Amino acid sequence: MKRYLELVCPAGTPMALRVAVDAGADSVYCGFRDCTNARNYPGLNFDPDELRAGVAYAHARGCRVFVAVNTFPRAGDLGPWQRAIDAAADAAADAVILADLGTLDYAGRHYPRLRRHLSVQAAAASPLAIRFYAETFGVSRVVLPRVLAVAEVAALIGKTGVEAEVFAFGSLGTMVEGRCYLSSYMTGRSPSCDGVCAPAEQVSYREEGNQLASYLGDVLMNRVDASEGAAYPTPCKGRFLVRGEPRYLFEEPTALNVMPLLAELKAAGVTALKIEGRQRSRAYVGAVVAAFRRSLDALAAGEPLPMETALRGVAEGGRETFGAYQKGWR
Amino acid sequence: MAELEFPILLAGNILSRLPAPVLTRAAAVLMRRLERRHPRLFRALSAQSQMMIGIEPSDLPHRFLLRFGGGAINLTAAAHFTQAPTTTIKGRLAALLALLEGRLDSDAAFFSREITVIGNTAAIVMLRNTLERDAVDLLAAITAMFGPAAPVAQRMALTLERHIASAHRRAEQRHDAFHAARREPAPLATRCERLEREMQTLSGRLARIEAQARRRGQSGKVT
């Protein structure tokens, strides 16, 4: 069967990688157990041996593995990022996902045959920026930020000729990716440099009367009633006082889901769909990958989209949105 | 991933009847079994700095305290925590066991408030991510204690679970039927008001039909 769109799936653990491959992923992305990737949580991610075994498992089943080395190195300390690229190449990964100019340059010079994908952390959202990365560093794919409408995605692809990967399910990510430092004011760490915006040791929940309160460091992020859904304790998903009323200012607890837009994204020239959630469980990975696999196979066969109701059960806040793909507020 | 779902009703029945000291001894045996089956998981948890997680199944009279890190792991049962854990996870036994076996997405369970986490999250995130790396099959670990009779024990557990489940369904049906029989019919005044409204509607419709018939009679049309 001809591939409709490439399905790129998250793997936070070796077990999740196997679940993703078995559920029908075309590609899996993962990262090392340190600050070199944007999902640096305790107990998560791969060591070099686990990556080698994961790549072998995926390749034996026709699935590719991309390694995210997508944080920004600290000044004068490129070592961990260089070692991560070396280890990805050594494990026979199919691509590295990079954001920093120095890591792109290093990978291009040392491993010219290793594909370089531009991480969403680079926030490349204009033809000029994308062409610069492609021409200067040989980037063959760009992961587009989650702030573009489908028409804007189509225009970008038309003007660059670079493969485009877009987010299909999971966290909304409405910030300028790679430039969000909100959490560093509260915790001293940021997703851009440390790979984590709500470090587990800085997050706490307290029962306050009938409400559940979440704190990041000493800062109150949210309070939810017993009947209300809980949200991630990140600054972008916190509730802020707006004219005296507590409101979700940047982002409500809602998951992105583009399932009904698959044909539009295909027509826009998109190459690959990215499922977000390396920090999520293998149960999430299995459910989401299998649902998208069914839909993509149905579209490839010219059949109507199957009704997928399982995704709401794993969606943040139990709600789904098209996000910026359909800018209904314009 | 576990092939058979855990017999949760059976487990709940047994666990709620056992006293805490017996449960603690049983937990020690189970932990040794699990360590033999999942050495990598136990090595990873032992290698952490010392952490203490409280586990509160909302449908059991017991609380559990899981200590790991600093080279040791143990699970104890008690009616109340004598030491305050750094983190406590609360939820129904079924949800907690599904998390242990990787059958439930913990974030989704947290969003929907199926589980609640209280306290600092460092230990619980570490535990969750470490458990995610291994496929724990609790039923297999427990029934393995029966040695060669393990498959028989597993079948018996699942058969008992089906019996308990059907007994629960029957009890629920009887409960519903009992309450349906006791349910009082709508009060007389309410029924009178409803009939009056229906009569008014019908009178209106009749008046319109009569007026229509009169107009047709005057114009000499016959339909």
Image (cartoon, rainbow, N blue to C red):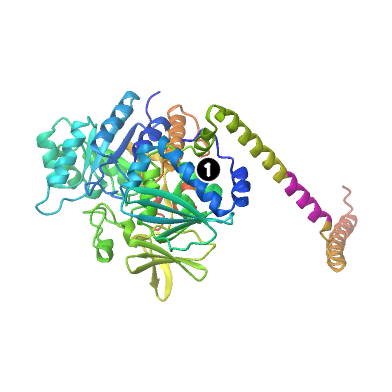
Residue A162 percent across, percent down from the top left: 23, 37
Q: In which quarter of the view is residue A243 placed?
A: bottom left
- Give the chain letter at badge 1: A
Q: Position of residue A294 (x, y in %)?
A: 46, 33
Q: Which residues are magenta?
A: B170-181
Q: Which residue is found at the position 49% from the left and 67% from the top?
A: A211
Q: Quadrant of the C terminus of chain A?
A: bottom left
Q: Is residue B113 left or right of residue B160?
A: left
Q: Is residue B180 magenta?
A: yes
Compared with residue A252, is residue A12 higher up or lower down, i.e. above or below? above
Q: Which residue is mark 1?
A: A309
Label the magenta part by its dominant secondary structure.
Answer: helix
Looking at the image, which residue is at 61% across and 46% down? B14
Q: Amino acid at mark 1?
A: Thr
Query: A65 or B149: which is nearer to us?
Result: B149
Where is residue B125? Give x, y as percent: 37, 52
Nearest to the observer: residue B90 or residue A5: B90
Based on the displayed image, in which of its 4 quarters is residue B43 positioned? top left
